[in-house]
Image (cartoon, helix red, strand yellow):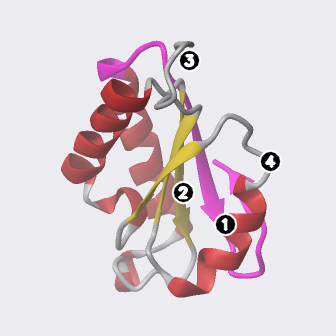
Amino acid sequence: MKKGTAHNCRAIVVGCMDFRLRSDIRKWTAKLEGGFDRLAIAGGVKNLPFVLEQVELSYKLHHICEVYLMNHEDCGAYGEEGTLKKHRQDLSFAKKIIKQKFPKLKIVTLFQKLNGNFVEV
């Protein structure tokens, strides 16, 4: 993270807009020191082109050094295709594409359970 400007933050957190997740995401992000940008979009990484645009803006404007990609169980945007296997595939692909474009960024992929647990995938 670049120093010396008030508009820097440590990370961007990308996840679904589902209201059921808010409280647990707030608790999880409380541990992120240095601030973060938050992108809440239906399906998390499902709309990868839009996610990439937002990660790029966060990188350019706020000099992030970390990306947290979160999908979750029982996601309405995925519907019946929303298996753990599908979420793993989409998260892995998103990580690969972001890493190609921004090789210095640390990228963490997580799957959020509705019970509040986050599993690194």
Q: Amino acid at mark 1?
A: Ile
First-in-chain label (2 vs 3): 3
The label shown at residue 25 is 1
Measure the alpha-carbon separation of dots 3 and 4: 17 Å
The label shown at residue 31 is 4
Quadrant of the rendered image containing residue 70: bottom right
First-in-chain label (1 vs 2): 1
Residue pointed to by mark 3: 1
Position of 110 with respect to 51 (left or right) is: right
Q: Answer yes or no: do the residues labelled 1 and 2 have beta carbons within 8 Å?
A: yes
Q: Answer yes or no: do the residues labelled 4 and 2 have beta carbons within 8 Å?
A: no
Check the image and report above or below for 97 versus 86.
above
**Mark nearer the viewer, 1 or 2:** 1
Q: Amino acid at mark 2?
A: Met
Q: Dot 2: few (<14), some (14–19), or many (≥20) neighbours within 10 Å?
A: many
Residue nearer the viewer, 109 or 4 = 4
Q: Amino acid at mark 3?
A: Met
Q: Answer yes or no: do the residues labelled 1 and 3 have beta carbons within 8 Å?
A: no
Residue pointed to by mark 2: 70
Circle 3: element type: loop
Is 67 in the magenta? no
First-in-chain label (4 vs 2): 4
Q: Where is residue 25 drawn, in percent x and y?
A: 66, 66
Q: Residue at x 48, y 81 (%)?
A: 18
The stretch of residues the image draws in magenta is 100-121
Q: Amino acid at mark 4?
A: Lys
Q: Dot 1: few (<14), some (14–19), or many (≥20) neighbours within 10 Å?
A: some
